[in-house]
Amino acid sequence: MSESVCILGIRINDRIKEAGSVQKVLTEYGCSIKTRLGLHEVTDKHCSTSGLVLLELTGPIADQDKLYDALGKVEGITLKRMDL
């Protein structure tokens, strides 16, 4: 495998307040996102206000870095990057 793989983990503390800001960034940099997985706890009696988004990035590293930097400016989230 000659390409590096970048995975971003985004923990959204309050989906009602912050999901729109996160979505705006993801839309702007959508061509850098190969895979997107969104998770939050849901049961018959409970729907979590927090959530987790996992992204597999693709394309030029410079574009991936721009996406990471833009997400880093969003209030109310925790952002982690894993380069493999």
Image (spheres, rainbow, N blue to C red):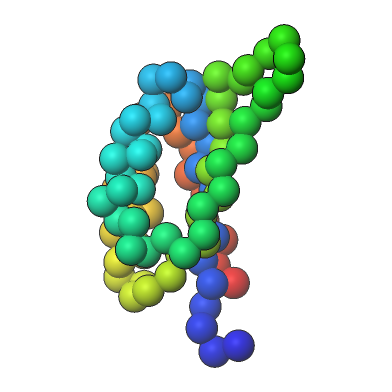
Where 63 sits versus 15, above or below? below
Task: Out of 29 and 81, give the one closest to the viewer.
Answer: 29
Query: Who's the residue at 56% across and 31% down the image?
Result: 51
Answer left or right for 78 relative to 68.
right
Q: Residue furthest right?
A: 44
13 with respect to 31 (left or right) = right
Q: Residue 11 at x, y = what percent?
A: 53, 36
Residue at the farthest front position: 44
The x and y percentages for residue 54 are 55, 49
Observer able to see residue 1: yes
Q: 56 or 66: which is nearer to us? A: 56
Q: Count the labels in the image.
A: 0
| Image coordinates for residue 27, horizontal then vertical, percent | 31, 48
Residue depicted at x 39% and y 20%: 17
Residue at 43 percent across and 70 percent down: it is 58
Q: Residue furthest left?
A: 28
Residue 73 visible, this angle: no
* Residue at 73% in and 19% down: 43
Task: In the displayed orientation, state which residue is furthest to the bottom.
Answer: 2
Quarter of the image that includes the N terminus: bottom right
Of the 4 image quadrants, the one containing the C terminus is: bottom right
Residue 44 position by quadrant: top right
- Image quadrant assignment for residue 65: bottom left
